[in-house]
Image (cartoon, coloured by chain):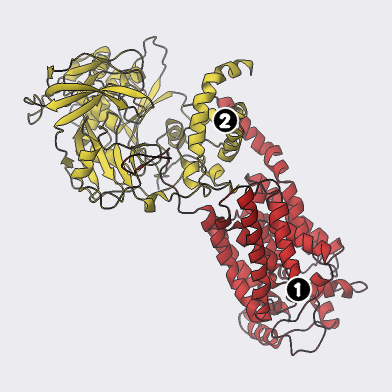
Amino acid sequence: MKSNRQGVLVSAAPFIHVRESTASLMLLIITCLLPSLAWSVFLFGSDVLVIVGVSVASAMAAEAGLSLVRRPGTLMDGTALLTGLLIGFSMPPSVPLYIPILSSVFAIAVVKWSFGGLGANWMNPAMAGVVFSHVNWPGALNSWKAPRFLTGVDGVSSVTPLGLLRSASENVEGPPMDLLREAGYRISSLDKALTARLNEGILSGLGARLPEGYVDLALGIRPGSLGEMAGLFLLAGSIILVARRVVRWEIPAACALVFGILVRLFGTGSEPLFSGDVLFAFFTGSFLLVTFFCATDPSTSPMSRPGLLLYGSGVGALIFLFRRYGAGSEGSAYAVIIMNCLVSLLDSALPAARSRRRSVASQGVGN
Amino acid sequence: MTVIRTFKYGGITIPPKRLPIEYPVMTAFLPTDALIPLRQHSGAPARRVVEVGESIREGQLVGKAAGAGSSNIHSPIPGIVTSIQRLPDLQGGQVEALAVALEGSFDRLGRKPETFPWKGMSKHQILRTIADKGVVEDDGSGTPLFERLHDPKGTRGACVLVISCLESDPWNSSGLAILKERGEAIREGIAILQRGLSPVRTLIAVDDPESPFLDRPARTEPGDEGPSVEAVLLEPRYPQDLPALLKEALSGKKAPSEEMIVLTVGTVASVYDAVALNRPQIERYITVTGDAVKTPGILRARIGTSIGELLEECGGFSSAPECIVLNGPFRGSAVADLDFPILKTTKSVVALTSAETHRHRTTACLRCGRCILACPMRLDPSRLFKCIVRRQVAEAVSEGLGACTECGSCAYLCPARLPLVQAFSLARKGAFKAGAAGGKTA
């Protein structure tokens, strides 16, 4: 860009751009996550703010340090803030503070910057940071706390529904919600009231009946990590992101479809074949958070439509695989980083992309 | 219900920036000092045929076409050649320009134009007149129209004439003004072109549902049954004016086998001026717009008028412009100098504010894929850019760099503000010099 004597810029066309910039896109994603944060603070208290704040601050500090050394000016693009936020969201409410700090620093310094920072990520930094924490401190990351509404209720506390289901379903078969109830899983009075209201109202007209417990799941009134709690808030945010085309719809659509079909066929762990509980699977664990906010990170997902569909299907299939047959009760972060590593293959090797390119190249020097 | 057609893949839908215009549009003041570059077309500069100090008439030949792509240049005003200057050329480099001081009387201005009985002219005479009067295409390329129409070896088979009423840029509305004010001239210009070209079909591509050409595409004088003209309504979409996309939009799946010759309404109006009014190309409809302009509008201006004078007639700047662009912000060129003159290929002067340009610092590619969805040529701009940055231009060429039309859709949408078009343009210029050798081995 040269500036002439009248102070008018002279550069190359096009001279106008859309309003969206890298920073504004990141800001929109962060904004869509804020309702979940607020809900989490309401459920678990102000400790949540400390954990998320520490995580964000350490991610941004790492980014600031590295951008000073390697490529200045990347701190304000919002990507480090988002990474820190997602890591904070994946922590359990009673986590010792050194874990989010070290995970965020690992995510930024090792995963994000090892090949040159934004745009050269080989894995989603946030997901890699989460995996890092799970590998190093499995115990600390598996101790849970009951949220508001559940503190006064008798029963087993501080186990996530998925974790409890895993131990409860070792010998018994049956719908997950029934098994949980038998194992002593607690349901809030809010859920009981709302479910009754729903069953009397809309659902009775449709001839359907909602069992107790699902309202708790959708509102995140269950033990779990900070950001995955409010499934409904996450869904609302994701609708905004898809509508504004910040995330490509292909990824969550393919992921939810494949995951849903597999769960329907093989269940979450306790159901007999072909009668899996899809609703339960969607609203437990970090499925929604990961599908809509982590797997969709554009830097670490393919660019062509067939690539996106395959990538989304892969994430969905792997989440199912890890949940159903894996060693831990949750494996969404692993699913995402494994598919991240396949992105460059998906981008370059898909026959559709290749044939398109050939046809374009054979047109030669047109126009 | 009629199906409104458009091209299939990519592109951008931007509502056209329609200006509240009163017709007839304002005629700009005649320039007291006109600057006439000797290159206002695609090829080599015209050969100067007047000297400093010589007094010239309105419409007198001042530059004679010199070789392929070159075109005659006429003086827009009567006056005295005061000096020969060097001007920056929009295609790069510098070009000779005549400075003419207004003096003497007008031969044409203010007089009722005489209509030349062109119906007695032969095909050859029509083309010859178009060449003599220096008509160039106003689609931005500046190709001399004669070269587009001429078929010296007789190799052209059947052809389809397509008159495009589409604007080259959402910020241009000059075509609209020409349509509104010169409808009859365009209809007659089409008839002239039909005689000069004998197309098997003539189509008018329109993207404004209120266009008068939809109801009455051809002249309908009694006893004047010329060849038929069909109007086709298209969806307004950028960059539909590119011939390849226009062809796709017009024909849908069943592409016509005939060659398509696409001309804009501005070109057709110039053809009418040249052949029927015996007038060289010395006047343009110029859209002066952008948020930095106080009262945007369309002006009829003589070639050689400086853009500064036009901006002044539109009330000057209401706020400081970030950049001033000729021919629209998508594909135009920025000018630094307000003394730069209007050329035969100029359509608009756009003074953009920073609120319109949304300029940001460049960040790394986010891989969001918007560029891929936007590219009407179905290229992968992010991949091409990566290849070029790594200096693998040959690889970029094999990925289809040659098909890029530099329409700017990708760079417009890029949230990382990568200089995509700039990179493609530079790589093409470098690639095709060295690329001839590479092409042979491939």
- Of all chains, the one bearing label 1 is A
**Left or right: where does residue B165 sit relative to residue B10?**
left
Residue displayed at 58% across by 64% down = A30
Above or below, A204 against A77 in this view is below
Colour red, chain: A
Above or below, A153 against A213 in this view is below
How many numbered callouts? Answer: 2
- Which amino acid, mark 1? Val
Colour yellow, chain: B
**Left or right: where does residue B97 sit relative to residue A155?**
left
Instruction: List the residue tagged with mark 1.
Output: A95
Q: CA distance from mark 2 to mark 1?
A: 52 Å
- Which amino acid, mark 2? Gly
Q: Split into 4 quadrants, where in the image is the N terminus of chain A?
A: top left
Instruction: Kindly report which numbered mark, 2 or 1, lies closer to the viewer in this rendering.
Output: 1
Q: Quadrant of residue B157?
A: top left
- Residue B400 - label: 2
